Image (tube, grey):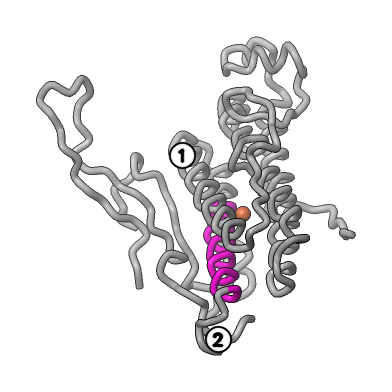
């Protein structure tokens, strides 16, 4: 079970109404390497992985939901006061026709989220390698969005999220070392 | 300590349609180098850690667009 804290993991500020940036950010909401995919991937893998790394998957999977909430907040703030005309210009006309300003789990190209983004191979090493790759891909996505964004507040929060991907990747790499068990007696903390 | 950004010079043909990017970069964050984190590493003060997204200077990976500045990582 979870406890909910009614605050964001990192404050989200937005400098200008910019629905075009929202369209790009949606990649990290409902895209293949986005936060939803990450959370669902890790939390699901917990049942078929050695005990020693279950806690790590719980921790990181939970944190991904906190990231999802940050992305949702950004998208909401970037679009909430935009006119239908502005949304159309930002390439969100089709989104508006279907959803008004509701958020939807889709990628930047408008493809709906699908569980085929997530692997669950049942082989602990294969699954952890997938997780490492997922973190590096999420890190890269944040880079590409930062490269396109001129919003200093959004970029500040995106840099925080990118750093978290670096830390997650590090922890998954360590989890592999733990499961290899032949690294001498290295301490886990 | 490792560097966060590496670069290479791709081939450019005189017949390329766009002005060539003579240098291309890619990111190499510290998690690629650290290995299993050793105990007793230096820590950021708490507030700074919350801001940066990591408690550990050894895992801190600053990033800014390579298209907007020429700061090497
Ligand atoms: Fe992550």
Q: Residue at x 51, y 88 (%)?
A: A184
Please name whichever residue, A45 or B50, is drawn nearer the observer in this view of the structure. Answer: A45
User: In this orientation, does residue B53 appear?
Assistant: no
Query: Could you tell me how many numbered marks the image carries?
Result: 2
Residue assigned mark 2: A186
Whether A111 is drawn above or below B27: the answer is above
Please name whichever residue, A114 or B24, is drawn nearer the observer in this view of the structure. Answer: A114
Q: Mark 2 vs mark 1: same chain?
A: yes
Please name whichever residue, B45 or A44, is drawn nearer the observer in this view of the structure. Answer: A44
Q: Which x, y percent locates residue B7? A: 26, 51
User: Could you tell whether B9 is left or right of A120 in the image?
Assistant: left
**Farthest-out residue, left:** B14
Q: Which residues are magenta?
A: A159-179
Q: Which mark identifies residue A144?
A: 1
Subunit that carries the residue with mark 1: A
Q: Say what secondary structure mark 2 lies in.
A: loop
Quadrant of the image containing the N terminus of chain A: bottom right
| Residue B9, quarter of the rendered image | top left
Whether A60 is drawn above or below A99: the answer is below
Question: What predominant SS class does the magenta segment belong to?
Answer: helix
| Residue A97, quarter of the rendered image | top right
Subunit that carries the residue with mark 2: A
Whether A157 is drawn above or below A21: the answer is below
| Residue A87, quarter of the rendered image | top right
Query: Is A171 within the magenta?
Result: yes
Q: Residue at x 70, y 37 (%)?
A: A115
Question: Looking at the image, in which quadrant does ligand 1 appear?
Answer: bottom right
Quadrant of the image containing the C terminus of chain A: bottom right
The Cα–Cα distance between marks 2 and 1, rounded to whole angstroms, is 36 Å
Q: Say what secondary structure mark 1 lies in.
A: helix
Query: Is A92 within the magenta?
Result: no
């Amino acid at each position: 079970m979870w406890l909910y804290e009614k605050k964001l993991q990192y404050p989200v500020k937005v400098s200008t109404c910019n629905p075009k940036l929202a369209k790009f950010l949606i990649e990290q909401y409902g895209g293949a390497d986005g936060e939803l995919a990450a959370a669902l991937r890790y939390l699901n893998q917990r049942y078929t992985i050695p005990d020693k790394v279950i806690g790590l998957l719980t921790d990181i999977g939970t944190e991904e939901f906190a990231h999802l909430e940050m992305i949702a907040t950004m998208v909401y703030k970037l679009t909430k006061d935009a006119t239908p005309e502005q949304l159309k210009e930002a390439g969100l006309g089709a989104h508006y026709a279907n959803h008004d300003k509701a958020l939807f789990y889709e990628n930047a190209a408008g493809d709906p989220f699908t569980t085929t983004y997530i692997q669950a191979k049942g082989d602990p090493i294969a699954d952890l390698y997938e997780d490492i790759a997922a973190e590096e891909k999420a890190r890269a996505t944040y880079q590409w969005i930062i490269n396109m964004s001129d919003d200093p507040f959004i970029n500040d929060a995106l840099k925080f999220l990118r750093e978290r991907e670096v830390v997650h990747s590090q922890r998954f790499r360590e989890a592999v070392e733990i499961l290899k068990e032949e690294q001498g007696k290295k301490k886990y903390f | 300590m490792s560097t966060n950004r590496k670069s290479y010079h791709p081939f450019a043909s005189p017949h390329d349609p766009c002005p060539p990017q003579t240098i291309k970069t890619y990111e190499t964050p510290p998690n690629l180098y650290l290995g299993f984190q050793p105990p007793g590493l230096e820590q950021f003060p708490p507030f700074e850690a919350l801001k940066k997204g990591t408690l550990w200077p050894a895992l801190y990976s600053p990033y800014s667009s390579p298209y907007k500045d020429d700061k090497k990582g």
